[in-house]
Amino acid sequence: MKKSRNRTNWIVMTLIVLGTIVVLFPLYMTVTIALKNPEQMRQSIFAFPADIQWSNFSKAIEMTGFFRALGNSTLVTTATVMLTLLTNSLVAYAIARNMNHKFFKGLYFYFVSAMFIPFQIIMLPVVKLTSGLHMTNLVGLIFLHTVYGLAFNIFIYVAYIRSIPMALEEAAKVDGATTWGTFWRIIFPLLAPMSATVGILTCLSTYNDFLLPLIMISDQRQYTLPLVQYIFQGQFNTDFNLAFASYLMAMLPMIIIYIFAQKWIINGVTQGSIKA
Amino acid sequence: MKNRLTPYYWMTLPAVVLFFIFMTLPALQGLYYSFTNWNGFGDTYDFIGFKNYVNLFQDSNIGNAYWFTIRFAVVATIFINIISLLIALGLNAKIKFRNFFRAVYFLPNILSILIVGYIFNYLFSNVFPLWGESLGLTALTTNILGSQDLAWVGVVTVAIWQGIAFNTILYLAGLQTIPTDLYEASNLDGAGKWREFWSITFPLIAPFFTINMVLAMKNSLMVFDLVVAMTDGGPGRATQSIAHLIYTGGFKGGEFAYQSANAIIYFILIAFISIIQLRFLQRREGDV
């Protein structure tokens, strides 16, 4: 009985391995289909190809304007993450340090209550509004992603800031630091772990977002990666190998980042959600 | 005193303005349009009161979308929670390469739902039928996404495949907060595995169960990308979710005001379900 606690549980181990096959099988199929041609597909749909069709990638790149879409997605994601970290933490700081004040407390509930509002409710008016403001472009996307993340980010930032002792700031203020100076030089650096969480979550949701670009972006030169997969779906129907090469390339940047930063990403996501 | 607060006011001002313009204002506009007959393109419209709301309740497309979405959300929420709890228990047991497996199981969460939907769409139409034939499973021999009765099963399967990733990691975090000496004590008392789970493990991860139920339910009620990629609402309207109906009706069908009313009802539904869930589940937490 006691021994079993320290020994590997092989039954569980086997089940876990079988489970990973279920998780990885669609990805294996994506890779192999992206590397084959229709002839190789007819021979065996599952086998890894002996002769790799690199031309699928170059054709898919050309067809979808892959690099432009990648550039757009990277621009929107990077800018959204940066703008989110700089602004959302600042607002959360002002609220967290004045929660005993009616105005700031009200503000907190005003922001946080938006977590319950499904995007579909504001979707139709937002398109009308942004087109009136000439914001149906990448800049508009960056602003909207930043604003729509506010509710959740304020929620977790405020909880975190309230756990930072006031004494640190008071000492700085005695030394003559302004409120702004205190934020940038003392609080913002201390927020690094929570900012990592917010940054990761914002990065994932912005990069993978499909609905907002779908309703906002009409100029083909401003398509993001998910939008490109959607728009070109019709043309892919004739050639699955090209389609899968395109899917693989669109997913690859996040997979590569995940492989290197896997530990932080999982911890960050867990931390953020538990705070919520 | 006022002087002390001035910088804090300035800090919140830009966010308040942007939030009001892009969140509150559209929500109020949506509410306003829901009482009109605007089609979304023209210049003129009339104020028609509750007519849209009355019509909503007689519209079979609406009923259909709510039926699909609720059924989808309930099934997805239940399966996601059961399976991810089992996986988390497995990952928390004595196994080798735990961190590697943890990383693999979380992987689906970082992928675009749209692209995942396209990949599974292909698997359902070309790969699973091959398995169905070789295994003699008649249900799988044809593409189930093309069947009025079975398409929703295909969509829900993929939602579960992807949804498990996130909930597993949260359950795992919950399991790691349980002190191991509790298990040692129950072991000494001769408690079996089953008893151990219901008396120790489950009560102690109850808060994680609450979060996971609410998140899985909310995400499933909002399903859109997956529907677009897998069935586009079809065949017929068999897998049209509420979000999909608002999008297609509102942007392409000239039903801007009508779908605004639908969106308001949709919001009430989501808020209602979330609050009920939180209340019910938190009370359960308190009991144990």
Image (cartoon, coloured by chain):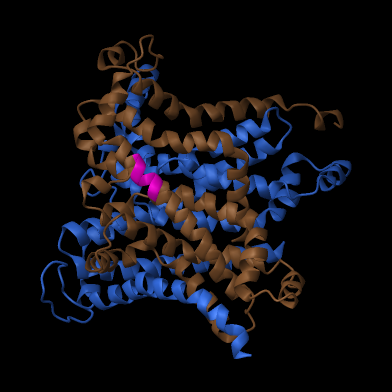
Q: Residue at x 59, y 58 (%)?
A: B210
Most frequent secondary structure within the magenta stretch: helix
As drawn, is B189 to the left or to the right of B242? right
Q: Is residue A73 magenta?
A: yes
Identity of the residue drawn at 71% across and 35% down? B93
Q: Position of residue B165 (x, y in %)?
A: 53, 42
Left or right, residue B211 beside residue B190: left
Q: Nearer the viewer, residue A267 or A169?
A: A169
Query: Does B124 sit above or below residue B282?
Result: above
Q: Position of residue A95 (x, y in %)?
A: 58, 75
From this view, report whether residue A191 is shown above or below residue B94.
Answer: below
Q: Colour of chain A?
A: brown
Q: Where's the N terminus of chain B, which quadrant? A: bottom right
Q: Quadrant of residue A141?
A: bottom left
Image location (x, y in percent) of residue A222: 27, 48
Could you say which quadrant of the image residue A122 lies in? bottom left
| Nearest to the observer: residue B203 or residue A7 | A7
At 71% from the left and 66% from the top, the residue drawn is A163
Q: How many marks?
A: 0
Query: Which residues make up the magenta segment?
Result: A70-75
Figure colour of chain B = blue
Specify whether A207 is left or right of A261: left
> Does residue B152 show up?
no
Q: In which quadrant of the rendered image does the C terminus of chain B lie?
A: bottom right
**Is residue B222 positioned above or below B263 on the image?**
above
Query: Residue A217: horizontal and vertical position, in percent?
Result: 26, 53
Tell me what residue is drawn at x 40 percent, y 58 percent.
A145
